[in-house]
């Protein structure tokens, strides 16, 4: 079983929550277009000035997705 990597995009400022929520829509569209094996996406509000959008990819897809979508950071996904 390959590792799962959570790719994260950070959004800051008063509109960060709406921006992260909207960014998740584009991540779902990308997954459908590229026919990726995982479809785990989401967004989280950290505080009123910071929110994140994320998608989970497999190790095999990580470099291609990273290069195409330029996430700000990543971490191993446990879940």
Image (spheres, rainbow, N blue to C red):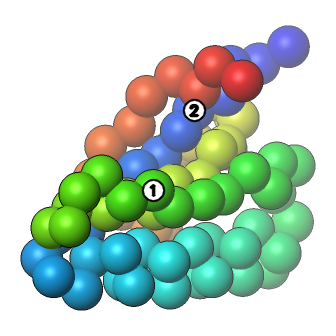
Q: Position of residue 23 (x, y in %)?
A: 48, 79
Q: Which of marks 2 and 1 is in front?
A: 1
What residue is rendered at 43% in x and 28% in y?
75
Marks 2/1: CA–CA distance: 17 Å
Circles 2 and 1, Cβ within 8 Å, touching? The answer is no
Secondary-structure class at tag 2:
strand
In this view, the residue in front, 37 or 47, is 47
Q: In which quarter of the image is residue 67?
A: bottom left
Disc 1 target residue: 44
Q: Is residue 3 left or right of residue 19?
A: right
Mark 1 burial class by Cα count in 10 Å: few <14, some 14-19, many 20+: some
In this view, the residue in front, 33 or 50, is 50
For residue 48, above or below residue 39: below
- Image quarter (top left, top right, bottom left or bottom right) of the C terminus: top right
Residue 48 visible in the shown view: yes
The label shown at residue 5 is: 2
Q: Position of residue 49 (x, y in %)?
A: 15, 67
Say which label, 2 or 1, has the lower sequence index. 2
What residue is rendered at 66% in x and 57% in y?
41
């Amino acid at each position: 079983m390959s590792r799962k990597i959570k790719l994260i995009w950070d959004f800051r400022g008063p509109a960060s929550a709406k921006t992260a929520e909207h960014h998740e829509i584009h991540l779902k569209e990308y997954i459908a277009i590229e026919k990726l094996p995982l479809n785990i996406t989401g967004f989280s509000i950290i505080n009123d000035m910071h929110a994140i959008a994320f998608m989970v990819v497999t190790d095999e897809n990580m470099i291609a997705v990273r290069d195409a979508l330029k996430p700000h950071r990543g971490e191993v996904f446990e879940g």
